Image (cartoon, rainbow, N blue to C red):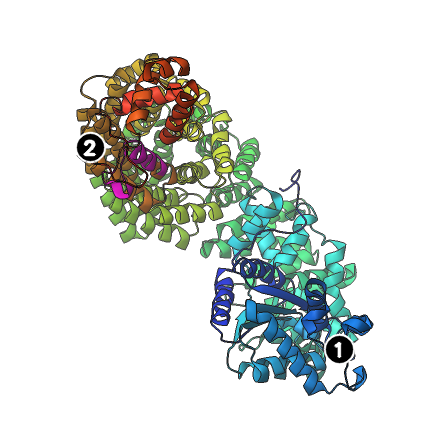
């Protein structure tokens, strides 16, 4: 999944540590105020303590603090005394020279031996030999040195790996913290929590420090899934697939070092074998355990990351005292942790993986068979509801195929009961895998192979694994007799057609129409009604006339068998796509929602909420749309169908939040959709919305998301309601980087879309973007085509009407007609009615320009002020910059208040001559100045108007009416001009 991607060796970004960084900055703030502070930073190996302190050191240095770093050495109690202080003092000597030690070089030589070699002329005489320096005196000297260094600016002393510190180092740290308390000194110490076994000398030392004044503890936890994704994205240089993030996060449990190691090993999803260096590192601590404890760890590893004491006892078959001694050693070695419920868990999943991989083949099969038998006999030995899956896993690992086959089928049913459809799909895939290995599989399971394929297909579809589901439809159709079982074949064809469309491979009509042909001759019944409703809903997107005929047939059949069509999710989809009702079928959707809740029909309820949120959005009822989508998100999550039936709920919610101007919440909803990773084209909506948000906010890296979204246009087929928003995104992306040629190409492609006039909701934003392109490029022909399309496109609901008014205003500006100001006033009024702040901000910007041209400075000021407030509230950086530029050009101060004219009277005279097409020489002649002075004036005008050349300056002057004002008198610098 990550093949072909260049992987950086280590992540350069700090992820998920803002709270800890804030705590360190607060401690630095106290230190700057003269209060001595100490921060103890703990966390397991590889969790990112050093990376956090590197980031903090950079911040501290930027704030004027001096940073010294020392590291403890892995030599134990008998190791080199004062090693971290020696490293820090060595840095002082290197940067400040021997003079920093104020004549006490001989005493400091106890910590830094090279000071004993200082030339005699540089060292002050001393009365004590180096080896006889009293320790208390030495500690005072160190504290005084740090005080002197901190007199000029705060000092941050970082001591890493305190778990390896010798006794002398701990004593000196204790002295600095409790006794010396040097002002303006911040002491930061790191230690590994997983090294602190019960008898470790650092345990009581940390407890003593905790009681001292000014000491804080910061504990670094593992990263969450989003943190893992951010680290992977930095390492890979691209956003990783959701499945890759899930697998890496599951294996590493958010440990940054392990994430880096797996990523560097290649494809972490397909990496069944741990990298050798990482394996050796993980097993090093295991190898230090007594052999009985190692043996128990191997047994426990076969049981999983988490295991119950009683289950382990059953499988191990050891006397209780031997088992407890072995577990005690594992807990003391920080390899296993105990919880209050009496269960155990490997401290890290990769440790269990490494130990499990060390099992011999026979040992592996034997242990897993013991686990399976033990759980079958006593299901209560595992967590409630987990016994079927655990039994299936262990029999499979034990290579007992008949038992594994039956257990997998039972576990699949249990997973479905818990709405765990992805797990159900995986277990049914195992049934298919084992089918060929068990000769009497059909008799054992009581079903034929096509039935297993159909169950697996249904589970894969519900779980959102559409590619696998498509493959299963082909396999199932190959085994079904179409003549003998037409309805069964029709259902498979219908599923295949929909999957083809969802994956963007084709429109699926060939398969759907063949399904309808097979269903025609089948007697009425509930299954046939549901099939006809599905077929009608799918055809509505490609052939509305045939869809209506099939829908009528489905309703007649439903009445004949006494079914309520409101509970059919696909019937709901069809109702939402009719334009006959002014409320777009809202009343029917409300009834369907109520009925689905009353009957407990989860798929119908989620489908109702999907389409309810969609219809409410189209009607301009954005707050209600957001509420419906949010309710649907909860229901879809509860029933495990977030990636299938409920795939659009998060993006529908994000769309409503964008319309409401709640962009941070919208971005968070898109991020959640990214984590769910909806399959096929159902994953396009959130992608397109987030890409648009990033363009509107000028995100530092919008190209990757924009590119991923626009790549969908290259698919063989895309539903028009998905395709048209991508047309708009392509234009907006080009305009965002001022690529007028690409914007023009994208606009031509958009106007050529055959479904543009059929979908006003999606069509109007496209037309607005094309109109903006025509205005920015001055393309009158393109503007004429836009006008023709706009005249033919219905504008039924508030947002569509607002887009229509905005297009009219933009085109009025292109034509330079006399009604430009009135047109922009109408557009602003329409967007106020529609209730979308961002388009309103854009319309206000257009109104401000039109008012500037008309010379209405009060209207300009009001429009600029409101547009600026909208841009600030939304974080719409480009809009804010455009507003600020316009305000500067027309001479408004911050907040849109009238101010001095931007150009001096002389510059206005020069600008008039520039607009008339005169060269610098001719301007000089006209104004009786030198050509060099004329050139200087032109350069200043270009800079003040924020344009690229004199042609753009002249065009802007005409557009904003800068040539129609009375020239302002020149004033001295700093002197106010009157209006």
Query: Mark 1 highlights which residue?
Result: 124
Q: Mark 1 falls on what kind of element?
A: loop
The residue labelled by disc 2 is 857
In the image: residue 451, left or right of residue 405: left
Q: Nearer the viewer, residue 566 or 448?
A: 566
Q: Quadrant of residue 258?
A: bottom right
User: With 187 as the anchor, is 893 left or right in this view?
Assistant: left
Give residue 474's mark.
Answer: none
**Magenta residues (range):** 881-899
x, y percent for residue 76: 75, 76
Q: Is residue 913 above or below residue 674?
A: above
Query: Is 327 or 706 nearer to us in this picture?
Result: 706
| Residue 890 drawn in magenta | yes
Q: Residue drawn at (58%, 55%), measured in percent from left and top?
A: 249
Mark yes or no: residue 607 visible: no
Label 1 CA crowd tier, 10 Å (few <14, some 14–19, many 20+): few
| Quarter that holds the N terminus | top right
Q: Magenta part mainly helix, strand or loop? A: helix
User: Residue 756 in the image: x percent, y percent?
Assistant: 34, 22
Q: Is residue 159 visible?
A: yes
Residues packed near mark 2 inside 10 Å, few (<14), some (14 to 19) or many (20 plus):
many
């Amino acid at each position: 999944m990550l093949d072909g991607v260049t992987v950086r060796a280590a992540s350069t970004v700090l992820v998920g540590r803002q709270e800890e960084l804030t705590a360190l900055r607060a401690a630095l703030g106290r230190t700057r105020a003269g209060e001595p502070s100490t921060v103890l930073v703990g966390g397991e190996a590889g969790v990112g303590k050093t990376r956090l302190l590197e980031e903090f050191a950079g911040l501290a240095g930027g704030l004027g603090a001096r940073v010294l770093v020392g590291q403890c050495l892995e030599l134990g109690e008998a190791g080199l005394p004062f090693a971290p202080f020696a490293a820090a003092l060595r840095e002082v000597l290197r940067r400040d020279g021997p003079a920093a030690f104020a004549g006490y070089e001989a005493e400091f030589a106890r910590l830094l031996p090279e000071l004993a070699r200082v030339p005699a002329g540089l060292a002050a005489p001393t009365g004590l030999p180096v080896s006889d320096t009293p320790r208390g005196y030495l500690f005072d000297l160190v504290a005084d040195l740090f005080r002197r260094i901190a007199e000029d600016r705060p000092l941050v002393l970082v001591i890493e790996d305190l778990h390896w510190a010798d006794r002398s180092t701990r004593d000196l740290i204790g002295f600095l913290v409790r006794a010396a308390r040097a002002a303006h000194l911040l002491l930061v110490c790191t230690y590994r929590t997983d090294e602190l076994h019960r008898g470790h000398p650092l345990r009581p030392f940390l407890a003593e420090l905790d009681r001292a004044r000014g000491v804080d503890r910061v504990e670094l936890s593992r990263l969450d899934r989003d943190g893992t994704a951010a680290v992977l994205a930095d390492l890979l240089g691209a956003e990783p697939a959701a499945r890759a993030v899930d697998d890496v996060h599951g294996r590493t449990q958010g440990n940054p070092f392990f994430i880096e190691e797996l990523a560097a090993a290649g494809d972490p999803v397909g990496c069944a074998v741990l990298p050798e260096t990482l394996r050796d590192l993980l097993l090093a601590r295991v190898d230090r355990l007594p052999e009985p404890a190692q043996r128990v760890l191997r047994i426990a590893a076969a049981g999983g990351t988490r295991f119950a004491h009683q289950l382990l006892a059953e499988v191990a078959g050891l006397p209780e005292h031997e088992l407890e001694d072995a577990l005690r050693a594992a807990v003391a070695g920080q390899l296993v942790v105990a919880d209050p419920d009496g269960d155990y868990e490997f401290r890290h999943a990769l440790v269990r993986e490494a130990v499990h991989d060390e099992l011999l083949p026979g040992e592996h099969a034997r242990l897993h068979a013991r686990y399976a038998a033990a759980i079958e006999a006593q299901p209560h030995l595992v967590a409630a509801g987990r016994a079927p899956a655990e039994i299936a896993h262990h029999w499979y690992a034990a290579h007992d195929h008949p038992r594994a086959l039956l257990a997998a089928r039972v576990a699949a049913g249990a997973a479905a009961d818990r709405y765990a459809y992805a797990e159900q799909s995986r277990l049914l895939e195992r049934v298919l895998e084992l089918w060929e290995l068990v000769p009497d599989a059909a008799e054992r399971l009581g079903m034929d192979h096509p039935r297993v394929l159909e169950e697996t297909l249904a589970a894969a579809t519900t779980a959102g694994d559409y590619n696998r589901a498509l493959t299963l439809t082909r396999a199932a159709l190959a085994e079904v007799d179409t003549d003998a079982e037409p309805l069964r074949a029709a259902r498979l064809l219908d599923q295949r057609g929909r999957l083809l469309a969802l994956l963007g491979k084709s429109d699926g009509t060939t398969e759907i129409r063949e399904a309808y042909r097979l269903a025609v001759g089948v007697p009425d019944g509930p299954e046939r009604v549901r099939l006809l409703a599905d077929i009608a809903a799918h055809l509505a997107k490609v052939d509305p006339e045939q869809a209506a005929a099939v829908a009528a047939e489905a309703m007649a059949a439903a009445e004949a068998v006494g079914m309520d069509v409101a509970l059919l999710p696909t019937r709901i989809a069809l109702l939402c796509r009719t334009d006959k009702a002014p409320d777009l079928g809202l009343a029917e959707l409300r009834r369907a929602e109520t009925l689905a809740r009353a009957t407990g029909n989860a798929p119908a309820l989620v489908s109702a909420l999907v389409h309810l949120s969609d219809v409410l959005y189209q009607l301009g009822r954005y707050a209600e749309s957001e509420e419906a989508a949010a309710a649907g998100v909860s229901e879809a999550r509860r029933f495990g169908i977030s990636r299938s039936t409920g795939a659009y709920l998060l993006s529908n919610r994000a769309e409503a939040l964008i319309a409401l101007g709640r962009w941070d919440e919208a971005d968070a909803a898109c991020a959640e959709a990214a984590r769910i990773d909806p399959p096929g084209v159902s994953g396009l909506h959130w992608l397109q919305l987030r890409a648009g948000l990033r363009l509107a906010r000028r995100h530092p890296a919008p190209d990757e998301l924009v590119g991923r979204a626009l790549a969908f246009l290259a698919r063989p087929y895309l539903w028009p309601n998905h395709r048209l928003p991508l047309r708009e995104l392509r234009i907006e992306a080009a305009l965002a980087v001022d690529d007028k040629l690409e914007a023009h190409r994208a606009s031509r492609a958009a106007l050529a879309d055959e479904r543009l006039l059929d979908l006003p909701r999606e069509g109007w934003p496209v037309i607005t973007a094309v109109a903006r392109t025509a205005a920015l490029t001055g393309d009158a022909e393109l503007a004429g085509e836009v006008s023709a399309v706009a005249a033919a496109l219905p504008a039924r609901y508030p947002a569509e009407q607002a887009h229509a008014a905005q297009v009219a205003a933009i085109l009025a500006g292109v034509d330079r007609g006399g009604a430009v100001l009135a047109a922009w006033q109408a557009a602003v009024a329409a967007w106020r009615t529609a209730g979308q702040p961002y388009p309103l901000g854009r319309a206000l910007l257009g109104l401000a320009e039109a008012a500037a041209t008309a010379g209405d400075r009060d209207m300009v000021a009001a429009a600029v002020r409101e547009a600026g407030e909208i841009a600030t509230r939304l974080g719409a950086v480009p809009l804010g910059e455009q507003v600020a530029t316009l305000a500067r050009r027309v001479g408004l101060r911050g907040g849109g208040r009238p101010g001095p004219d931007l150009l001096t009277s002389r510059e206005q005279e020069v600008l008039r001559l520039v607009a008339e097409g005169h060269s610098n020489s001719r301007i000089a002649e006209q104004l009786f100045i030198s050509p060099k002075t004329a050139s200087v004036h032109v350069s200043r005008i270009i800079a003040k108007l924020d344009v690229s050349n004199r042609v753009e300056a002249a065009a802007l002057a005409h557009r904003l009416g800068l040539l129609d004002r009375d020239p302002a008198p020149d004033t001295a610098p700093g002197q106010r001009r009157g209006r």
